[in-house]
Amino acid sequence: MAAEDSVDTIVEDRDRERYQPSPETEPVEPSGSLAAALQAACDGAVRFDEYTRVLYATDGSIYSAQPAGVVFPRDVEDVRAAVRVAADHNAPVVPRGAGTSLAGQTVGPGCVVLDLSRHMDEIQAIDPDEQTAVVQPGVVQDDLDAALESHGLRFAPDPASSNRATIGGGIGNNSTGAHSVRYGITDAYVEECAVVLADGSLIHTRDVVLDSPEWDRLVSKDDREAAIYRTVRALVEDNADEIEARYPDLKRSVSGYNLQKVIRTDSEGNRIINLSKLLVGAEGTLGVVVEATLSLVTRPDETALAVCCYDDLLEALAAVPEALDLEASAVELMDDEVFRLAADSAEYAEYAEPIPEGTEAALMLEFDSEVVDDLPDAVAAATTHLVDEGRAFESLEAFSPAKQDRLWKLRKAAIPLLMSMEGDPKPYPFVEDASVPPEELAEYVAGFQEILETHDTTAAYFAHAGVGTLHIRPVLNLKDGDDVETMRAIADDVTDLVAEHNGSFSGEHGDGLARTEFNPKLYGPQLWDAFKELKSAFDPDWRLNPGNVVYRGENSTDIRDHLRYGPEYASLEPRTTLDFDEEGGFSHLVELCNGCGTCRQTGSDVMCPTYRATEEELTTTRGRANLLRAAISGEIDPDELYSEQFQSEVLDLCIGCKGCQSDCPTGVDLAKLKAEVKQQYHDRKGTSLREQLFANVDRLASLGSTVAPLANRATKVPGARTALEKTVGIAAERSLPTFQRETLVDWYGARGPQLDADTATAGVVLYPDTDTNYSNPAVGKAAVEVLEAAGVRVAVPELGPTGRAAYSQGLLEAAADQGRALLDDLEPYLERGWAVLFVEPSDAAMVVDEYRSLLDDERVETLAANAFGVCEYLDDHRLDEALSFDGATTADTRLTFHGHCHQKARGADHHAVGVLRRAGYPVEPVDSGCCGMAGSFGYEADHYDLSRAIGSILRDQLEDHTRRDGTETTVVAPGTSCRTQIGDFEGYDRPTHPVEMLAHALET
């Protein structure tokens, strides 16, 4: 594929070729079957293979059940066709967005899943004057908000999952977020919908004045739409007293159906029915929303935060009513368990640092400029009332967007962080979503704590205190049958407690499989019968997402059914080459994936680059973890791990960027899992010639250097590249390294150190990695020049590979041998107290991170403590401050910095930016993803197209950055792979290494 080809081409090719069931792994569906009928009726892909069923068996909840298959509709007609075919085959249908639901709404045993996130993701219209937008259900909320930003508008509900959650999913759940204190929930902002009903018919829901000519026309017809309108009106009018008595008066109440909101009276006295309000929160049980018209709100120009810290949870909750009197737009709560887990997380530790010691709970208040006139005064008032005159002991203030963003990231990380707790007991979501009047919140939590004590467990507390919605998650082990029964008993007790406080059992996350069982208790028999009649009017055969919101007696919903980890669940703990003790074992690392779907976000961070290019669930960290879990638990044949299909489609498309190690809130390190399974595969099946070549790339590069320049000319001989691709599988389109006759080690050996040991401030080994030593020694020379100018004595000995290349191929024993040899060679330097510096980030990550689980050697920790990237070392020791740089050189050269994925994974990508800025360069880091080169991945013929597709995303990020900046800029990147990929972009030169820019600016 050419570099300029669209990512859609990749997706379409994969739809057609990669994921069609093969005869060896999946029997072909017989003619006339459901799958065959769907394939004939729909333009979008239809997949009924085992892998797809596993991928769509779970969401962000505690539930799991394999569907019959998945349809990826391309348009409304595909949805209609799929629903009709499913009806003909009596198959249930479940619409799905990002699959982040926390109550099991998108888990449907034996159903046909409609994945609306793939193709139906267009923003169809924005009307800034009317403050409305028309969207398809697969639009991600953050993408919508980004498109609205230039108009000063946004969609008001803001769930924590907004960077991957879809608008359609938010409509299904009636979602909201931290700012519901001010804005309310989704049903207030959905004005019109296009909806596919259970028979495949399409209706348009909107405001209709009762008894108007339009009403008369609608109900006079003899069709399902007319019957629905007549039924809904009758149900609301006949049950008006019960609706008034049973529905709680809360900002957040999303249990059951919205009978209390479907008919309203406007300012002119007209009674208006809008079925859109009923479809919001219906969880796909009444129809499939295929388009929605949304009302929007303006963006406040400025905001500010006050975080008030308490040494007692109940005291923090008791302060909520007073906090609401301060005109805050959001009042959020976090407890000490969230802070503890964040502090232990690579991704969130920095965000927890400002929280003072002894904080048992914190209230975070946001103020915005549309509500308060003076933000500093509002924050000061919060401190006065809640700290000086209240029970809080300290207040943190945040006025800058960057500082506020860090605190919001901490708050939004609460759910996935809690699921990262070690061991099988986890704080599970099943009663986490109740909402009560804010003034009763402290009393409600005290009652909740009594329930927990009765059942001998604890819980974590966080979320939307300002509207009385706390996400309280009891800690249970659902692999234990007794704890499953305890879960049911706690849910029953909590439902009673919620009713005592005139609350709702769900204030945000919906009913799903977790809470539907208790709706009869909350709403009483009269409204429960009304719910069933309503469901039957929309869906006479009860095929749309059955078991959610409402159920029939013979098919009752039970919170204990379809658990992902139930008493029958068991997993194999394989014997491993790598050490998984720190993660609690191989299987525990796999099971850390809770399905939150953070790996589907595409707007920032690194994870997951292959998903960003393909939009395939299989290429998410979640998808790979789900398939690994299915294999080790026996859901699929455990030997499937070692099949060619699993290796090529699941593992080989993980490019080892390590983004999941830091970006995944629960720390699912897929790169490590992949390396282990690849080793086991090699033990069984052997290794290919290409794998052996790439694993031994250092030896090949040494040979190429020895015979340079002949080696460089050989690849330019006509037909040579084609032959390489056919014999070894190296892509003919990819530029190859150019070898230098004089290596970095040779150059340094002839040159020698320029500083005496007596005058040097420190001593370091500069590691001669493969690319720097044999192909780009200029980078190493620049590092030597800068270090010596900073007073550091440098040694560049001849050293073997770190094992990175072998590790990436899953050849762990070979990598371990190379690692031990390197430790032997470095030991004399380490004993002298010398540091070891790397210009190549992947080698630094290898010795700092991978060695810890690869090698059982006490010297590993010594090396890790003394291993640095070159700029990291300069920055940590502030050595650059002793250097003199030419201000004229630096001031005239604007730099754009692209960090290496492995640096980002270990939080080391900021060092180069700091050093370059202190040298005088105007430099801006790009919030960029992976380059897609990933060592050997981008050279492999079968992965070249995908590598380029990932790279094209980086190219767009670089170009967007340049357009925003408006000035000419030079790209710098520390990674060899990154520089190769960017250098292959049309119109781009190969970037320089940051240390080269430092050397260039040194004053002579």
Image (cartoon, rainbow, N blue to C red):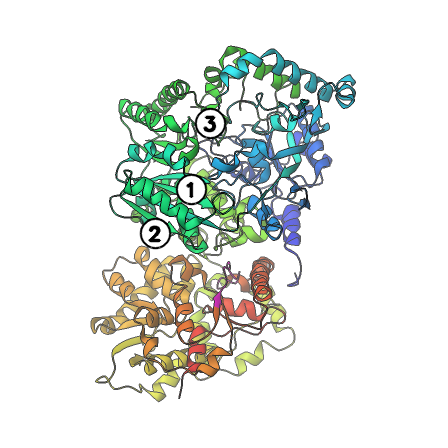
Asked if the residue under mark 1 is in contact with the one under mark 2, i.e. CB atoms within 8 Å, the reply is: no
Q: Nearer the viewer, mark 3 or mark 1?
A: 3
Q: Give the residues drawn in magenta, as a range.
A: 924-935
Q: Amino acid at mark 2?
A: Ala
- The quadrant holding residue 218 is top right
Q: Report crowding for label 2: few under 14, some 14 to 19, many 20 or more residues within 10 A (C-alpha).
A: some
Q: CA distance from mark 2 to mark 1?
A: 19 Å
Instruction: Say which of 939 and 493 sits in front.
Output: 493
**Mark found first going from the N terminus, 2 or 1:** 2
Q: Residue at x 67, y 33 (%)?
A: 192
- x%, y% of residue 923? 47, 70
Q: Amino acid at mark 3?
A: Ser
Please indicate whether residue 298 sits to the left or right of residue 302 in the image. Answer: right
Instruction: Say which of 756 and 134 sits in front.
Output: 134
Circle 3 SS class? loop
Query: Mark 2 sits on what residue?
Result: 349
- x%, y% of residue 187? 58, 31
Please indicate whether residue 645 sits to the left or right of residue 476 in the image. Answer: right
**Mark found first going from the N terminus, 3 or 2:** 2
Q: Report crowding for label 1: few under 14, some 14 to 19, many 20 or more residues within 10 A (C-alpha).
A: many
Specify whether residue 11 is in view. yes
Q: Magenta stretch: residue 897 in it?
A: no
Q: Magenta stretch: residue 934 in it?
A: yes
**Mark found first going from the N terminus, 3 or 1:** 3
Q: Amino acid at mark 1?
A: Cys
Query: Mark 3 sits on what residue?
Result: 506
Circle 2 SS class? helix
Q: CA distance from mark 3 to mark 1?
A: 24 Å
Q: CA distance from mark 3 to mark 2?
A: 31 Å
Query: Mark 1 sits on what residue?
Result: 593
Specify whether residue 567 is in view. no
